[in-house]
Image (cartoon, helix red, strand yellow):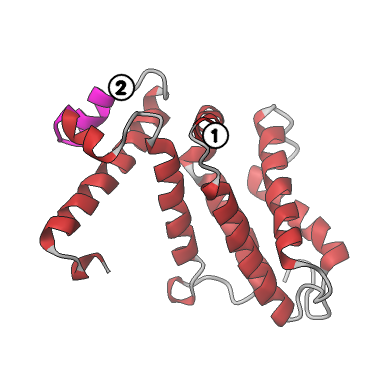
């Protein structure tokens, strides 16, 4: 898709993405507070002023990174990349990929939440819930989830459960790996939401 853009637009998009990837790496390695805009620009091999052509502040880059990660997550759930055929398994995959993101590291997760609240950008949270709702609807069509449940409400419950488990994990209560914790939580939820074609561990 990027190849179809005019060269100038393609270069701008490439620079924006390079700034986001560089920022995320530096935040992860050195901490959000210790990383400056100058550090990000230097590591991305652009002038400091170039950073501000794309992002108003250092804080503004975090919601942009989250939005980009959600785009990549949606792509990863497509059949072309070998995603599971089971929609419930795709829900588990989606949550696992979110959990593995550097944005779910404790400090960055807190800074992202603060940035979104400060800038009133709650779209990333809604986008993840909407993505889960799409998978729930597909699971209902496949008979894996009961058709009498409201997909958006169930997706909101999965979304809330995931972040509750993430907070629990960061608090030090770690009875299992985070992947196990999330998958077991989805399985537990499915005990009440399962349709006729779902089997635990399928």
Q: Where is residue 11 drawn, in percent x and y?
A: 16, 53
What kind of element bears circle 2? loop
11 over 40 or under it: above or below? below
Magenta span: helix, strand or loop, mainly?
A: helix
Q: Any mark on residue 109, and which? A: 1
The residue closer to the viewer here, 54 or 108, is 54
Q: Quadrant of the C terminus?
A: bottom right
Q: Badge 1: how crowded within 10 Å, few (<14), some, or many (20+)?
A: some
Labels 2 & 1 near each other (Cβ < 8 A): no
Q: In which quarter of the view is residue 178 placed?
A: top right
Identify which residue, 94 or 140, lies in the foreground: 140
- Crowding at label 2, few (<14), some or many (≥20) Cα neighbours within 10 Å? some
| Nearer to the camera, 53 or 92 | 53
Give x and y (percent) for residue 152: 71, 62
Query: Which residue appears at 14% of the width and 31% of the height?
Result: 47
Residue 135 found in image quarter: bottom right
* Image: 181 above or below 146: above
Determine whether the residue tagged by mark 1 lies in a helix, strand or loop: helix
| Residue identified by numbered label 2 | 36
Residue 183 visible from this viewpoint = no
Q: CA distance from mark 2 to mark 1?
A: 18 Å
Q: From the top left corner, tell me how far across and down residue 183 is, in percent.
A: 70, 55
Quadrant the N terminus occupies:
bottom left
**What residue occupies the far front of the structure in this picture?**
120
Q: In the orientation shown, which residue stands out farthest toward the top?
A: 34
Res. 23 in view: yes
Earlier residue among tags 2 and 1: 2
Name, please, the residue furthest toward the right. Answer: 192
Query: At 59% across and 52% down in the image, what residue appears?
Result: 126
Give the residues drawn in magenta, as a range: 37-48
Residue drawn at the location 54% of the way across and 29% of the way down: 114
The verdict on residue 33 being magenta is no
């Amino acid at each position: 898709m990027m190849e179809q853009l005019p060269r100038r637009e393609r270069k701008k998009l490439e620079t924006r993405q390079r700034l986001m990837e560089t920022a995320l790496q530096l935040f992860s390695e050195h901490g959000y507070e210790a990383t400056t805009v100058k550090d990000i620009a230097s590591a991305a091999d652009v002038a400091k002023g170039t950073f501000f052509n794309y992002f108003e502040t250092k804080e503004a880059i975090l919601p942009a990174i989250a939005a980009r990660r959600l785009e990549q997550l949606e792509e990863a759930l497509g059949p072309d990349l070998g995603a599971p055929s089971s929609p419930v398994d795709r829900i588990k995959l989606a949550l696992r990929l979110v959990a593995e993101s550097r944005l779910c590291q404790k400090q960055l997760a807190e800074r992202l939440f603060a940035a979104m609240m400060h800038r009133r950008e709650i779209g990333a949270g809604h986008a993840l819930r909407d993505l889960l709702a799409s998978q729930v609807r597909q699971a209902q069509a496949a008979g894996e989830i009961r058709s009498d449940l409201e997909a958006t409400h169930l997706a909101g419950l999965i979304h809330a459960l995931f972040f509750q488990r993430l907070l629990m994990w960061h608090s030090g209560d770690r009875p299992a790996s985070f992947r196990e914790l999330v998958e077991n939580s989805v399985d537990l939820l499915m005990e009440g939401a399962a349709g006729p074609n779902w089997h635990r561990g399928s």
